[in-house]
Image (cartoon, rainbow, N blue to C red):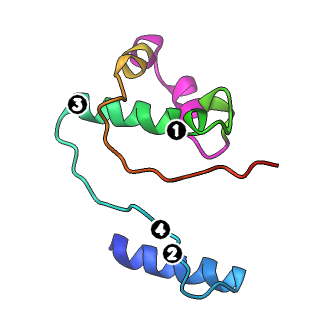
Amino acid sequence: MLAELHFKTASWVNKLDDARGRTVWQNYRDTVLTFERSYFARLNYVHQNAVRHGLVEDAREYPWCSAGWLEMSATPAQLATIESFKTDRVSVYDEFEPARD
């Protein structure tokens, strides 16, 4: 199902940009997280990604990040737990370079 979704959305985006054949979904892999610690470390990693790349100073500022929603929805204890998980051992290849104006 996800492969078909990626194919259709990539085709649609490339048609909008007149960029046929361009790779839209990069580094995709489907992983079933079976350990709570692994889930929280990856959640923290995803939330800090825009900060790590210098796009924002606080993850809640990035409009496509769920960090702001989580802060409004979770208890302070839940937030502290998620933020306590280190992300340095989450191994994700990342070649993203933000555009500098």
The residue lying toward the viewer, choosing from 87 and 68, is: 87
Q: Measured from the top left, where is residue 58 in percent x and y?
A: 64, 26
Q: Residue at x 46, y 16 (%)?
A: 75
Q: Distance from label 4 to label 3 (Cα)?
A: 26 Å
Sequence-earlier tag: 2 or 1:
2
* Comparing labels 1 and 3, the label whose residue is closer to the camera: 1
Sequence-earlier tag: 1 or 4:
4
Label 3 sits on a secondary structure element that is helix
- Tell me where the magenta segment starts and ends, as one range: 63-79
Q: Does residue 79 appear to the left or right of 90 in the view shown?
A: right
Q: Residue at x 59, y 33 (%)?
A: 51
Q: Which residue is mark 1?
A: 49
Q: Residue furthest right?
A: 101
Q: Measured from the top left, where is residue 64 in percent x and y?
A: 61, 46
Three-letter amino acid code at the position of disc 1: Asn
Answer whether labels 1 and 4 touch (C-beta < 8 Å): no
Q: Residue at x 40, y 35 (%)?
A: 43
Q: Which residue is mark 4?
A: 25
Answer whether labels 4 and 2 touch (C-beta < 8 Å): yes
Q: Does residue 91 appear to the left or right of 60 in the view shown?
A: left
Q: Dividing the picture into quarters, in which one does residue 11 lie?
A: bottom right
Label 1 sits on a secondary structure element that is helix
Q: Residue furthest left?
A: 34
Q: Dividing the picture into quarters, in which one does residue 91 lie?
A: top left
Three-letter amino acid code at the position of disc 4: Trp
Label 4 sits on a secondary structure element that is loop
Is residue 78 highlighted in magenta? yes
Q: Which residue is mark 2?
A: 23
Sequence-earlier tag: 4 or 3:
4
